[in-house]
Amino acid sequence: MTCQRHSLPCPSPSPEAESKLSTPSSTPASIRSSLRLGVNIDHVATIRNARGGDHPDPVRAAQIVASVGGDGITAHLREDRRHIRDDDLRRIQDATDLPLNLEMAATDEMLTIALRHQPHAACIVPENREERTTEGGLDAAGQHNRLAPIVSQLKDANIRVSLFVEADARQLEAAMRLGADIVEFHTGEYAHAVGEARAVELKRIADMSALAVKNGIEPHAGHGLTYENVQPVAAIPQLAELNIGHYLIGEAVFIGLENAVRKMRDLMDDVR
């Protein structure tokens, strides 16, 4: 089977033998359900902050996403507040019933903010002041002692915990030990790869998604996804959600946010 508009085959994940992880068998029918689309609205706030003031308002973007079939809103409150501001979180929650996925660094400040705002989910991401955007996955395996108390407190507050990691068995095992509800696999390497290298990255995401489900963790994916490359990832049957932001905001400049989100939704639905 080949994904529409693409030469890459729609993936059929193969089991991997991992000593500390249960390996996948068949895909339950419940997993082959529709794929959720979470829209990251950070870069609406980036444009707003470039000139100061209140326009364009990321809250309006969240409302538009809700009106055209988006399933959730993702917002990254960075330490330097380069796009989303603290008060944006409250306003987004007040303005829409869509679940808020708060991307946050593993810091005491961000933990306090997450506990105050009670988002539907908190996705812990790596953060570097010098980076333009998140450049790779969190090293959950190497930062267990730092992450464990943060994950525990978020879960105690009934906030779903997601870890933004590479599609790697070691990181998945670490997420399982930490008690994460979700892993969001970084798709940047897939997005930037070409030819056989892209097929290799796609298989890695597919295999780790199957392994995550087998071990009771919900797999998501995101970073660098576009109209041109989304369908092979969307066709991975175990994936529950894709989070896409920068590309959609860029397309919105030309075709409007409503049309940009609808087109992505349609491409995803075509293969699920």
Image: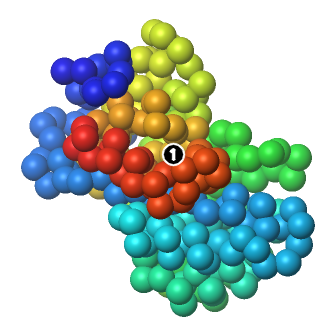
Quarter of the image for the N terminus: give it.
top left
Q: How many other residues sit within 10 Å of disc 1, few (<14), some (14-19) or many (≥20)?
A: many
Give the residue at mark 1.
Answer: 222
Q: Is residue 24 left or right of residue 209?
A: left
User: The residue under label 1 is which amino acid type?
Assistant: Gly
Residue at 23% from the left image edge and 54% from the top image edge: 34
Residue 61 locus on image (x, y percent): 58, 70
Furthest-front residue in this view = 255
User: Is 243 drawn above or below residue 87 in the view shown?
Assistant: above
Residue 119 locus on image (x, y percent): 53, 79
In what element is the residue under mark 1? strand
The quarter of the displayed image where residue 158 is located: bottom left
- Most foreground residue, 22 or 2: 2
Q: Is residue 148 visible?
A: no
Residue 256 locus on image (x, y percent): 55, 57
Residue at 40% from the left image edge and 48% from the top image edge: 263
- Most foreground residue, 101 or 271: 271
Q: Is residue 99 left or right of residue 124?
A: left
Residue 98 locus on image (x, y percent): 43, 76
Q: Is residue 190 visible?
A: yes
- Most foreground residue, 138 or 60: 60
